[in-house]
């Protein structure tokens, strides 16, 4: 399991590297946002631990660029206690989890384990929620064994929702991840995709709930 730690505080970095290496992860460390971005562009990791306040390029921009390249690697962001907006921005940009400094290293280790588990499911070809299945390699969605008639873009939206089943996905997150595929996505377009997906899902045990002002959630009924 390869973990990229991007943190410029030397004391915190040392603690992070120590605990992660002790847990037998293959850990790379970078203390500069610009260099981390270059590295993430050419190398694959199973998890990225990303500080938000970094020299040369802040963590939010590193994350935005990472997601723009359609990399679905799990990202855990580290934010300062007084920077609530960093946390919100980070989650909107597609971070999977966050820790507020100062945090307990044992807590970090637990979050890392959980994200890596989630990442392994995400990396496999077949996603399953209830009787809904999505083969992300073969680009085929089935409900109760019957193939659904969905466009490539609708399959992308479904994949994002399935990877976060039971959790809210905001319109900004959806637009951010979809725009990585080379097109600006409007709120209206997202609503149209949701409408189409719901029509396809209506006979099954899975539904897409609208969370007013927050986004969408795919869940089992
Ligand atoms: Ca920092």
Image (cartoon, grey):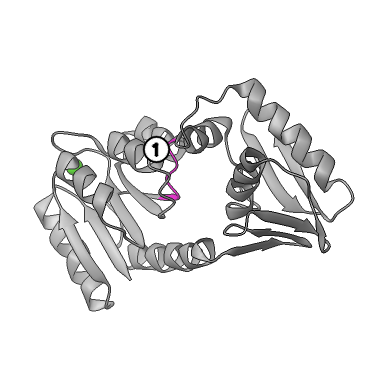
Q: Is residue 189 above or below residue 21?
A: above
Give the position of the N terminus as an image quadrant.
bottom left
**Residue 62 in picture, x, y percent from top left:** 28, 39
The magenta span reads 93-97
Q: Residue at x 67, y 44 (%)?
A: 217
Cβ of mark 1 under 8 A from ligand 1: no
Residue furthest front as drawn: 138
Residue 75's place in the image compared with 46, above or below, is: above
Q: Which residue carries the number 1 mark?
A: 68
Helix, strand or loop for the magenta stretch, by majority: loop
Can you say whether 198 is above or below 122 in the image?
above
**Who is closer to the viewer here, 60 or 97?**
60
Q: Quadrant of the C terminus?
A: bottom right
**Crowd tier of the residue under label 1, counting other residues whose Cα lies within 10 Å: few below 14, some 14–19, many 20 or above:** some
What secondary structure is found at the residue carrying circle 1? helix
Identify whether 213 is placed above or below 36.
Answer: above
Relative depth, front residue between 53 and 57: 57
**For this view, does 88 lie left or right of residue 168?**
left
Residue 164, x across and y down, in percent: 59, 51
How far from the left and from the top, in percent, is residue 158?
Answer: 65, 46
Single out the residue that lies furthest toward the left: 10
Q: Quadrant of ligand 1?
A: top left
* Residue at 82% from the left image edge and 64% from the top image edge: 145
156 relative to 207 in the view: left or right: left
Q: Residue visible at 38% across and 34% down?
A: 84
């Amino acid at each position: 399991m390869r973990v990229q730690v991007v943190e410029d505080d030397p004391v915190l970095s040392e603690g992070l590297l120590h605990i992660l290496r002790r847990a037998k992860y293959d850990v790379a460390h970078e203390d500069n946002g610009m260099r981390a971005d270059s590295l993430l562009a050419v190398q694959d990791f199973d998890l990225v631990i990303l500080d938000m306040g970094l020299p040369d390029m802040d963590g939010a921009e590193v994350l935005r660029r990472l997601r723009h390249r359609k990399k679905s690697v799990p990202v855990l962001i580290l934010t300062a206690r007084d920077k609530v907006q960093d946390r919100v921005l980070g989650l909107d940009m597609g971070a999977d989890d966050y820790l507020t400094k100062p945090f307990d290293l044992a807590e970090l280790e637990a979050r890392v384990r959980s994200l890596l588990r989630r990442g392994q499911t995400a990396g496999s070809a077949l996603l399953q929620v209830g009787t809904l299945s999505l083969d992300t390699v073969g680009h085929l969605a089935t409900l109760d064994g019957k193939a659904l008639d969905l466009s490539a873009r609708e399959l992308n939206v479904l994949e994002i929702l399935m990877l976060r089943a039971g959790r809210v996905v905001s319109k900004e997150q959806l637009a951010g991840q979809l725009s990585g595929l080379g097109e600006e996505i409007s709120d209206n377009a997202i609503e149209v995709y949701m409408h189409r997906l719901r029509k396809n899902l209506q006979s099954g045990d899975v539904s897409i709930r609208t969370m007013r002002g927050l986004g969408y959630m795919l869940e089992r009924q």
